[in-house]
Amino acid sequence: MADSGDLTSLLLRVEAITKNFGAVQALKGITFDVERGEVVALVGDNGAGKSTLVKIISGVYQPTSGKIILNGREVHFPNPAAAHAAGVETVYQHLALIEELDVADNVYLGRETTKYGVIGRMMGVLDRRQMRRATAAALESLHIKIPAPTMPVRMMSGGQRQAVAIGRAMTWGRQLLILDEPTAALGVEETEQVLAMIERLRDEAGMTFLVISHNMQDVYRIADKIVVLRQGRHAATLRKQETTMEEIVAYITGAK
Amino acid sequence: MSALPLTRQRAVETVARYGIVLVLVIMVAALTVLSPIIRGEQFFLTSRNLIQVALQAAINAIIATGMTFVITSGGIDLSVGANVALGGVTAALFMRDTGIGPIGGFFVAMAVGGLCGAFNGLLITRLDLPPFIATLGTMGMFRGMALIISDGRPVYGFGREFLQIFARQIDLPLIGAVPTQVVFALVIAVVFWWVLNRTKFGKYTIAIGGSEETTRLAGIPVNRYKMGIYILCGLLTGVAAALLLARLSSGDPTFGTFYELDAIAAAVMGGTSLSGGEGSIGGTIVGALVISLVRNGLNLFNVPSYWQDFVIGAVIVLAVMLDRWRKRQTRRV
Ligand SMILES: Nc1ncnc2c1ncn2[C@@H]1O[C@H](COP(=O)(O)OP(=O)(O)OP(=O)(O)O)[C@@H](O)[C@H]1O
Ligand SMILES: [Mg+2]
C-alpha cells in the first residue's frame, strides 16, 4: 500500500466535515483520506454518525461545514445524481433495490437506455432488450451469478440482492463505491460471497471502497484501513497491518 | 415467514393477475343464464343492454386508468368524482356563455381536470401532505367550486353540437356501431398500457410506489414525476367529465358522486396494489367492466340502487384482503 501522503493515489479527502440537524451535532469535524484501490472501513457505535457521513459524501445531505475533495478537486453534490455523475455510487442498506422491478430495470434505474432516436428519448421509450443484454454482460464480467436479468428482485435471496446491488454500483461507479452494512442481513455463506466479491473487485479491477460495518470480523478481513467515529468525532484512523481487533474495539467504545 | 416455493408463488401470482378475468367470464355467463329465468326473456345479452354496460364502464375506465397510475405510485386520488363535476360544469358554462364551441369545451374540461391534478400534486409534493388527506380536502373544495359557479343548479343549453360529437356512435369495420365514449376508453387504455409498461414514466411510477426513497437515491426527481402522475389522473378525469357531460346532456354539480369509489375499485380488483409498486391497466379495464356488470346485474334483478354502492364498497374491501393475502404468500422476508 502507498503512503497516505502520496497525492497521485489519493482519491477522496473528507476535510473537517460537520453536520448539524437543528440542535443535534451529528458530525463534529471529520477528516480522513481514501486512496485509490483500497478498502476503507467506517466503524463506530450506533449513532456515531457513519450513515450521516456517507449521505454527505453521496449527495443526500449537505454538510454544515467542511470540504469533500475528489481527485484533488473540491466537489459539491447537491443531490445523489451529482455524486453519480462524479463516479461515486452508494449501496444503501435497505434502500438499494426496488423489489417490484426486475434485475435489469434496477441496474438501469435512473440511467435508462431509450430507443427510437430523439423522439424515443423525449418520450422515454425504454430499450429493455438492450438494457437486459448489457446487464447480463456486466454482471457476468463481475462474476455475479443471477438466474436471469428478467428475474424480479422480490423473488431473490438476500445474497443475490446484495450481489445485484453491488453489481449495479460497480457498473456505474467509476471512482468510489460506498457500501452501508453490505452483510448485515446475510447468512454465513452469503456474507462470504459478498466479502470475496469486494476483495476481488479491489484486487482485479482496482476499485475503491468505503464500507460501513458493525461486524469486526468482516472489517478486519477486508479493510486496508479503518476509520473509527465516536459520537460524531473522528476517533482514529488505523492501518490494518498496524492494529489489532482489540484496538479497533477499544477506539469504538472509547476505552482508548 | 411463510414463503411458498417458487412454483407456488408463481401460481398465486397468476391467479391474482388473471382471477379478475375469470370473475368477468363467470358474471357474463351467470347474467346470460339468469336474466331469462328471472325476467322471462333474454334481457342481459341484448345489444342495447351491452352498450349500456360498456358506456358505464367506459367513463369509469378512463378515470380508473389515471387512478391506476396514482395508486401504483403509492398514492390515492379521492378528488376525481368532484373533479368530474367541476370539469363538466365549467365546460358547460364556457360553451353556453362564450363562443368556444364543442372542441373548446372538451379542452376546458381537460384543462380543469389537469389543473385540479396539478393542485393535488402540489399539496402532496411541496407541502408533503399524505395523498389521502390532500385529496380528501380537494374533493370538498372541487365539489364546492362546482356548486358555487353553477349556483347549485344543472347547466343546460350548451349546444347540440357537443352531444353530436361526443355522444354518438362510430361505425367501425367488422365491429359495427360503437359509442364514441367506448372508443375513447379503448384508445386511452391502449396508450396508457404502453406508457406504464414501456416508458420511463411508467417505470418510475412503479419504482416510486415500490420505494420512494430508493427511487430518490437513484437520482430520479421523484417530485417531478409525482406531479406528472397527479396531473395525468386529472387530465383523464377531465376527459371523462367531458364525455359524461355529453352523455347526460347537462352539467350538473352533483355528478360524479362516488366515482372515486368505482375508480379505486376497478384498479384494485384488476390487481393494482393499494400499497404501491404494482399496477395493471388491463386489469383495471376488466375491473371497470366487472363493476359495470355488478351494477347492471343488480338493476336486472331490481335490487334497489342503494345496494349498488354497498356492493362496490364491499368488493373493494374484498379485493384489498386478497391482495394482502397474496403479498404474504409471495413475499420473501
Ligand atoms: N435526519 C436526521 N435528523 C436529526 N438527527 C439525525 C438525522 N440523521 C441522523 N441524526 C442523528 O445523528 C446522529 C448520527 O446518526 P447516524 O445515523 O449517522 O449514526 P450511525 O453511525 O449510522 O448509526 P447506526 O450504526 O445506528 O446506523 C444520531 O444521533 C442521530 O440521531
Ligand atoms: Mg447507520
Image (cartoon, coloured by chain):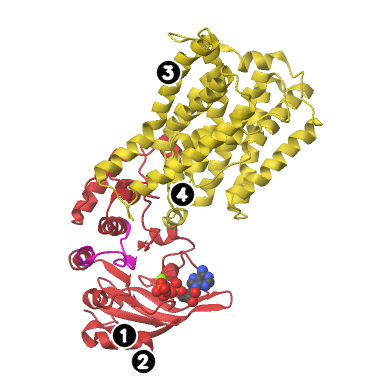
Chain colours: A red, B yellow
Write down the chain letter for disc 4.
B
Q: CA distance from mark 2 to mark 1?
A: 8 Å
* Element on which disc 4 rests: helix
- Badge 2 and badge 1 in a common chain: yes
Residue A230 within the magenta-colored segment of the rendering: no
Do the numbered discs 4 and 3 sit on residues whose CB atoms are within 8 Å? no
Q: CA distance from mark 1 to mark 3?
A: 72 Å
Ligand 1 under 8 Å from disc 1 Cβ: no
Q: Please name the residue that numbered disc 4 is placed on.
A: B208
Q: Quadrant of ligand 2?
A: bottom left
Q: Is residue A203 above or below residue B140?
A: below
Q: Position of residue B200 (x, y in %)?
A: 42, 42
How many residues crowd around disc 4 within 10 Å: few (fewer than 14), some, or many (20 or more)? Answer: many
Q: Is residue A196 above or below residue A100?
A: below
Q: CA distance from mark 2 to mark 3?
A: 77 Å
Identify the mark at residue A255; answer none if there is no mark. Answer: 2
Q: Is residue B95 above or below residue B32?
A: below
How many residues crowd around disc 1 within 10 Å: few (fewer than 14), some, or many (20 or more)? Answer: some
How many residues crowd around disc 3 within 10 Å: few (fewer than 14), some, or many (20 or more)? Answer: few
Q: Quadrant of residue A35?
A: bottom left
* Element on which disc 2 rests: loop
Do the numbered discs 2 and 4 sit on residues whose CB atoms are within 8 Å? no
Please tell me whether mark 2 or mark 4 is closer to you in this view.
2
Instruction: Give the magenta range.
Output: A170-195
Q: Is residue A187 left or right of residue B131?
A: left
Q: Residue at x 49, y 11 (%)?
A: B37
Q: CA distance from mark 2 to mark 4?
A: 45 Å
Q: Please name the residue that numbered disc 1 is placed on.
A: A249
Q: Please name the residue that numbered disc 3 is placed on.
A: B29
Amino acid type at mark 1: Val
Amino acid type at mark 2: Ala
